[in-house]
Image: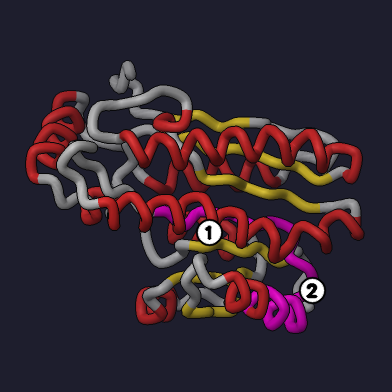
Amino acid sequence: MADKPLIAITGASSGIGEATARAFSAAGHPVLLLARRLDRLQALGLSNAVLKQVDVRDRAALAAAVTDAEAEFGPVDMMFANAGIARLGDIAKQPPEEWDEMIDINTKGVMNSVHAVMAGMISRRHGTLMMMSSIAGRKVYPDHTVYCGTKYFVHAVSESLREYLAPHEVRVIVLSPGIIDTEVLDHVNDKNTLANYKANKEAIGGGISADIVAELILNAYNLPQRAIVQEIVITPTRQRY
């Protein structure tokens, strides 16, 4: 067993997930890292890490990974439901299969992540759910139709979960980033949407580092359990919308 509690992170192979894995590992926490790209997890080279090749759409595999890691390092004290995908595009031209992928990963995957740890947190009366949303879960943007829908879902579910879990001393924090330097654009197949996104990003001087977001997550987690930052909204200073 480690001195500090176990932290679980989905989508830990890149972007904010990877940066958060590094931040919590550096702070002395054992980490359960889940992603579809196992080689990327292995390349991180973090100590006290359990690495699992898991697709968050697979509820049973996700739960089994949590069970295995908890047998080694004790209960998961924070689940960062971070895994997500952004298939942005013109809604009238976008293949419905891209809708399905976003809905399954960004909504069902989040719920599968919560389900894997929630009962344990309730029984221990301790724990934190860090829910990955977006500023696209607070307002709509062109060519973000279904993506926005999935992130609005995260906001609504998180508000309900917070109300439900508060009497059990379990925290629910929503993370709503703006333009961050991650691989999110790798999933955009609509060329016009991609060009517009890149132009907007360039116009504001680029995104901000995922490391900045990771430090905010660590700071929010480190507050006393009776204190909660209910939502973290972070964008580049020049991002006005």
Tell me where residue 199 appears, x and y as whole percent.
11, 31
Q: Secondary structure at mark 1?
A: helix
Q: In the picture, residue 232 is in which quadrant?
A: top right
User: Which sits in the foreground, 143 or 230?
Assistant: 143
Q: Amino acid at mark 2?
A: Gly
Tell me where residue 36 appears, x and y as whole percent.
41, 73
Q: Amino acid at mark 1?
A: Gly
Q: Give the residue furthest to the top.
A: 240
Mark 2, other Cα within 10 Å: few <14 / some 14–19 / many ≥20: some
Would you say residue 130 is visible in this rendering?
Answer: yes
Q: Is residue 15 above or below residue 190?
A: below
**Is 140 situated left or right of 59 in this image?**
left
Q: Secondary structure at mark 2?
A: loop
| Residue shown at 73% from the left, 41% from the top | 161
Tell me where residue 165 appears, x and y as whole percent.
82, 42
Q: Is residue 208 above or below residue 214?
A: above
Tell me where residue 163 appears, x and y as whole percent.
79, 34
**Is 162 situated left or right of 98 in this image?**
right
Mark identifier at residue 74: 2
User: Which sits in the foreground, 50 or 197?
Assistant: 197
Q: Residue 42: say if magenta.
A: no
Location of the N terminus (image quadrant): bottom right
| Residue shown at 55% from the left, 40% from the top | 154
Q: Is residue 40 above or below residue 11?
A: below
- For marks 2 and 1, the one nearer the N-term is 2
Q: How many marks?
A: 2
Q: Nearer the viewer, mark 2 or mark 1?
A: 1
Q: CA distance from mark 2 to mark 1?
A: 23 Å
> What segment is highlighted magenta in the picture?
65-84
Q: Residue 72: say if magenta.
A: yes
Kindly identify which residue carries mark 1: 109
Would you say residue 182 is visible in this rendering?
Answer: no
